[in-house]
Image (cartoon, rainbow, N blue to C red):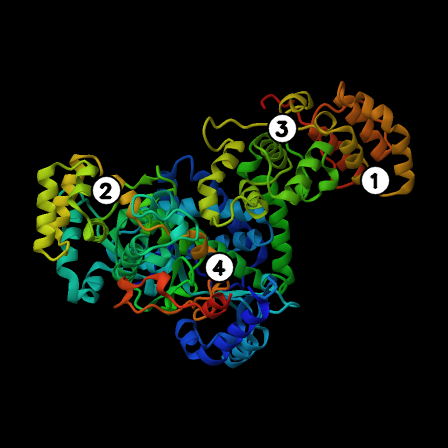
Amino acid sequence: MNMSKRRIAIRDYYATEFDVDTLTQVIDFSSFSTREFGFVSLNGKFFRNIAFETPDDLQDFLIDRCPTDAYIGAVYDNPPSRKRPIHTLEWIGHELVFDIDINDYDAVRKYVCDCTGAGQVCLRCWQLINVSISLIDETLRRDFGMNDIIWLFSGRRGVHGWVRDSNTFDLDRDQRQSIIDYLSIIKGEDETARVQERKQLKYEFRKRTESTIFRYYLKNIRRKDLVELGLSGNVATNTIRQLKHQDGYVDDNLARSFNLSLARVNKYDEILRRWAPRIDHKVTIDLRRLLRMPTSIHGKTGKVARILDFEDFFDFNPEDEPSIFSDIEEQR
Amino acid sequence: MLLPNWFLLQAPPNLNIDVKAWKNLAWNRVQLLEKLPNNPSQVIRDYFPSYDEALNQIYEDYRLGAYLLRLVAATNSRLESWLIEVEGDLFERLYYDRTETIDEKVIIFRQVFGEENVLKYEEFKLRMDEEKNEYLAELYQQYHTSRSRKKRDFLLCVHFSKVPWMVSKRKGYLRKGWVVSNEASFRGVLKKAFEKKLEEEIIKSQDLLGIREDIDNAVQDLEQDLSKHVQIRSQYSGGELEGQDLFLHPEIFPPCMLRIYFEFEKTGRLVHVQRLQMGFFLKRLGMSVNEQLHFWYDKSVDNVGQTFSEFQRTSGYQIRHLYGLEGGKKDYNVPQCSTIATGYFCPFVHLAPAVLIEFLKENYYTTKKKLKILNSHLNSLISVSSSNPTQACSQYFRLVYNRSLYRKIVHPLQWTRFAIKIEGLSSPQEPENKPKEE
């Protein structure tokens, strides 16, 4: 792709469409000047340990330098700089963040859709991400008492969750890891990952997990899929009939009976293994890690890492997201 | 409601005390801590009788003694590890035996976890009023059965950030950020939290050092005496070298260990046998379990994304195993040179001649003259290296230190012991027992 055209496209985005107020909706504004930023320049060079006095300075920098990717890190006691890199500064805090990427589902995506390549993503496999968000969001609110959670499209193949509650800002690595452990129903990433025993999950969390996963699983299910899974013809027909009767809504009763049916054919673990949340835990627990800056451009796709509204979230299709590079591609 | 008088985290209000008497109080505390593992119930009965106002002075003396030990621990990391461990054990025992009422227990919880991070179940119920019905039904079922209605057991709520282990393991019920469980299930994390808090207090107490000369002298004396007196787990086994932090001086490492050390520094990775070799060696140089855990955690690249506590749980097992704290509880020694040559890593055996020459030249040699001498002996050194590595190693030692050896080097610690003598780091003794196990 022509570099100067990319530069113009990026500059135009940051000059006209980028809104610093939206950014400060996600990150804590009061500590802006001591926050670390990192960028990838047009020629692919990565640099970090940068801080800005005000959001406007950041915008000026983005317009001037036109970085292909912009990242945001933790807050320190002093503004990071090349002379004073972050490892010489005292870490003050970082929002609790979650990174869910469709790549982490590669081992199980084949059961959901036909996507194979690393870059591929479709509406069907995006449902795996939706299950994760739904479950994580509800668990964080109900079990952990967090209220201020924002979900963003990562710009390519995943989503980022930002928890802005002030009492999560200074959580240490162990505390963040404990949240990840609590949310993880499966241990391991591959197809044979171990699913936690039901008795290890407390009743309400288990009920929530099962009903969320079954809701998504049964959303577009056909009778033959259930038969293939090993359920008897009668059970499959009854499940489909009940789903139709309830307009696709999976209530507790349906979840319970489907659960029993799965247990009978020994497929309960199988469904959970395929659909359970897969969080990139390194992103959450690494306190000095840089994460894509909300409302910035993804350098490879040209798509904006924008905030997702929870209401229309479940119709979201990453393939439909506009790219600022689309005009350049068309000209080629 | 007042704090139970045995609880010692707070500093004593008044330090106007004769230093000699204060040191005696510290030694009394050491005696108490040493007696505890043998007969805990007896110690608690003898030293901590049930509350009586007349005993206030005794408890105040305990506090003073414990505080001086804390100051000493602030100057010596190994004593710090020891103190945290033994005070943690004492705390656990006292909490179990000497907190009579629920209110007293809640006070201790609040002191350790922070006032705002602990709720009684009744307070929690009030906060959850609007949605309690569905949720509390399960709690009721779980905890109000005859099985769990044990004497003195009650429900308690602690903020999730204070009990990450319980969150990870899903011990207790999480609701709106509170972990709800019976008091007994919090005991393990309470002890850990106490130890963490004590560690913080030890760091804080450093502020008192360097202000009063008499206190500084007392701390220094006590530190010297205690270092010899107390048993620190890493020192249980024989055959260590005595000296201040010898593991911080790679220049006294024998070639095998130095090569592994540099390799690890450079790449952040080692193969299994080399990790073992290095681990045994560092242990015998006096590195404590904790120091070694940090050493591997800080330098290894394979633990990216792993928290220290996760590392302790996984890789930490192997490290504790080296110290005889896990598995067969065998106190391993550093393998002898003959074993190293066959099953571990010896540069004279395992390095290609060109790489070996480069390695031998690069390290230990600081002057041109020494290098010239080495060059003249390189051929003979290389020629015996694979057939008789111990002879090559002894020859190399003589070249490096320009000293003749009265015996051949057959053990890595032998090199280090001789090197220490020459470098003047300390004057170690030959171990009474030769290494037996590998």
Mark 3, secondary structure of its residue: loop
For marks 4 and 2, the one nearer the N-term is: 2
Badge 2 amino acid = Arg
The numbered mark 3 sits on a residue in which chain?
A: B
Mark 4 touches mark 1? (CB < 8 Å): no
In this rendering, would B327 be left or right of B146?
right
Disc 1: CA contacts within 10 A as few (<14), some (14-19) or many (>=20): some
Quadrant of the rendering where the C terminus of chain B is positioned: top right
The location of residue B89, given as percent across then percent down, is 41, 44
Residue denoted by label 1:
B365
Badge 4 amino acid = Leu
Residue denoted by label 2:
A198
Q: Nearer the viewer, residue B367 or B93?
A: B367
Residue denoted by label 3:
B334
Residue A211 in view (yes/no):
no
The location of residue A104, given as percent across then percent down, is 40, 49
Q: Nearer the viewer, residue B427 or A56?
A: A56
Q: CA distance from mark 4 to mark 1?
A: 42 Å
Q: Are marks 2 and 3 on the same chain?
A: no
In this rendering, would B172 be left or right of B226?
left
Q: Quadrant of residue A140?
A: bottom left
Q: Nearer the viewer, residue A322 or B7?
A: A322
The residue under the point 60% across, 29% down is B238
The residue under the point 47% across, 50% down is B307
Residue B146, compared with residue A78, is above or below; it is: above
For marks 1 and 3, the one nearer the N-term is: 3
For discs 1 and 2, the disc positioned in front in the rendered view: 2
Mark 4, secondary structure of its residue: loop
In this rendering, would B369 be left or right of B421?
right
